[in-house]
Image: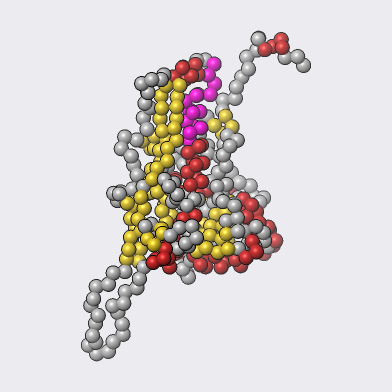
Amino acid sequence: MNYDNIITTTAQKVAPFVVDAVHGSSVLSGRGLANPKKWDMGQYETNPIQVSESTTGGFFSGMGTFDTSDVSTDVNLKWLSKGFYQNITLSIPEISLNATEAGIIKLVKRKMDVAKGAAISQVGSALYGLGSGDQFEGLQLQTDNGTYSTSYGTLSRTAYGTYINGQVTAAAAGVISFNSLAAQVDLCSSASNSDESTNLILTTKTVWGLIETIVEAKNRGNYTTKSSNGGYMVVSPYTESGSLVSREQLPVGQIGFDSYYFRGIPVVKDDKCPTGLVYTLNERYLRFVSLPLVGLKSVQMSYEVTQGAYQNQPSTTAFQLTDERMPTNALGKVQQLIIYGNFRNANPRRSGVITGVTTT
């Protein structure tokens, strides 16, 4: 067909949304940033941690002789605040042209969506990182045992490693199995105390698939977890810590798995998780601590005119937005999306990582 005759006579309609083909999803950032703790401790976010036993006790007979000396058992984990910004530049002439009848997708909203996607993606990667420079202190630092860092929370790993090091296990010959996963969970958990035990396992899509093959092989043994009405139970970035919901509450089918459970712990894949790693976490101690910045306002991070992985972000987040400002030498406006604070683990020994997973 020759389209030359209709180019000048027929308007070309534009879809009223943009599809995000760049970003994947992140369970860790979705959960960590959705319910931030308020930074209210001054220069440092501080959390006391016990690192020694009291020695002023013992067995006795008769009146006895008691040790009444004062013993110090606690030290402070401390975190400094850090920040991330994502710039938004708005051209007033472009906004004005977009405001005419020909404007299908609102340019201001689209610019904001682009900034939101970039910010969520970069912060999501940082939450798995080492916290180098001005980056937030991610899981690589929190679960380290001295390989990548000499301290955590300003405490020396040499002096306090028993109490602040994560539980790191190298996968033997790259193999992940139920036995190795069980051993790792045991390392991170206190016996018979659910509050002090692993309640979330995060890994890559590849490793998640490897574990799924083990689950599938055992499927006749009823290794699936179902709700009372027969539907599969799932975990999303936005379900509360340690909780799960039925298929009626999220758009999942009954064939295959959105997540599966090991010892009742959800095993979830995350696009941001580094290759070959399986994190065993206690979410009770993981928290993003957010500093409310004077003059800034909290902002929802869900997409407005874009369809993609970030279109269903939670309404409450740690992100804040500056007011629009017009530069003196250009016809435009600028804003910044800001997140300020740090990602902290108040009890690192209750989290850990299996490294180098390649096969089953």
| Rendered location of residue 23, percent (x, y) | 56, 39
Characterize the magenta stretch by its predominant secondary structure: helix
Residue 268 position (above or below residue 14): below
Q: Which residue is drawn at the image coordinates 62% and 14% (left, top)?
A: 11
Image coords of residue 86 (percent x, y): 45, 35
Question: Can you give x and y, in whole percent of width and height, for residue 46 in the image?
Answer: 33, 55
| Residue at point 60%, 66% (across, down) | 180
**Residue for point 45% across, 49% down:** 132
Residue at image location 35% in from the left, 63% down from the top: 49
> In x, y percent, where is residue 77?
36, 58
Which quadrant of the figure has residue 160? bottom left
**What is the image's colouring?**
secondary structure
57 to 147, vertically: above or below: below
In this orientation, does residue 296 appear? Answer: yes
- The answer to whether residue 177 shows anywhere in this view is no
Q: Is residue 28 magenta?
A: no
Q: Which residues are magenta?
A: 102-116
Quarter of image, res 195? bottom left
